[in-house]
Amino acid sequence: MDFKLAALKLTSGQMKDVLTARSGMTFGGILFQRAWVQGTLVAEYKKGYFYLDDGTGIIELQLSNDHLLRNWKIGMYVMVVGLLVMRTGESPLIRVHKMVDLSGSPDREAMWYLEVIEAYKLFYDLSFE
């Protein structure tokens, strides 16, 4: 994984526009390998695998052994950064390398959507008016 490439702030709904490239993926012409998402943990379907709902769709999370030491609970609002894996006919998968519980931040969801909109305007769609 190339850590020089930025982790793009994306929603599940935007991931349908992600294209596969030779050394990663592209969104809006920007090459990336890692995605940064936020949302609510809605299910753990086996040890170390969660479903996250970001309000636009479902993203599957695959936690590393380091993250299994934390007591993640359904209903937590979390920030996740990791390698994005797009799969045909399935929800996107993120192989998590950073996960933070933001449940204690009261404006977390509204702020997240503003951050995604700002990133979209500034970086992803340079023709945005």
Image (spheres, rainbow, N blue to C red):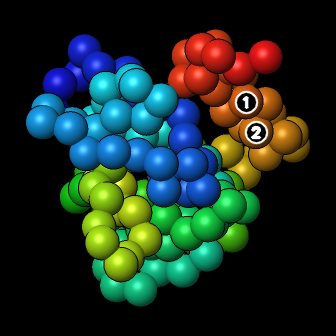
Query: Which of the pair 31/108 is nearer the observer?
Result: 31
Residue shown at the point (48%, 56%) measured from the top left: 16
Disc 1 residue type (three-letter): Ile
- Please provide percent x and percent y for residue 51: 50, 72
Which one is in front, 95 or 16?
16
| x, y percent for residue 93 | 35, 62
- Asked if residue 18 shows in the view, the reply is yes
**Which residue corresponds to mark 2?**
113
Label 1, secondary structure: give it.
helix
Q: CA distance from mark 1 to mark 2?
A: 6 Å
Could you tell whether 87 is left or right of 117 in the image? left
Q: Within the image, what quadrant is residue 2 found in? A: top left
Q: Is residue 83 at least partly visible in the picture?
A: no
Q: Position of residue 125 (x, y in %)?
A: 59, 23
Mark 2 Cα-neighbour bin, 10 Å: few <14, some 14–19, many ≥20:
some
> Relative to 87, is 98 on the left or the right?
right
Which one is nearer the viewer's eye here, 48 or 120?
120
- Is 35 rendered above or below residue 73? above
Would you name the residue on which mark 1 appears? Answer: 117
Q: Quadrant of the C terminus?
A: top right
**Percent x, y of residue 78:** 60, 51
Quadrant containing the N terminus in the rendered view: top left
- Contact check, label 1 and label 2, Cβ < 8 Å: yes
Examine the rendered structure and indicate whether residue 42 appears above or below residue 83.
below
> Is label 2 in a helix, a strand or a loop?
helix
Q: Quadrant of residue 35?
A: top left
Q: Name the residue at 55% across, 69% down.
A: 58
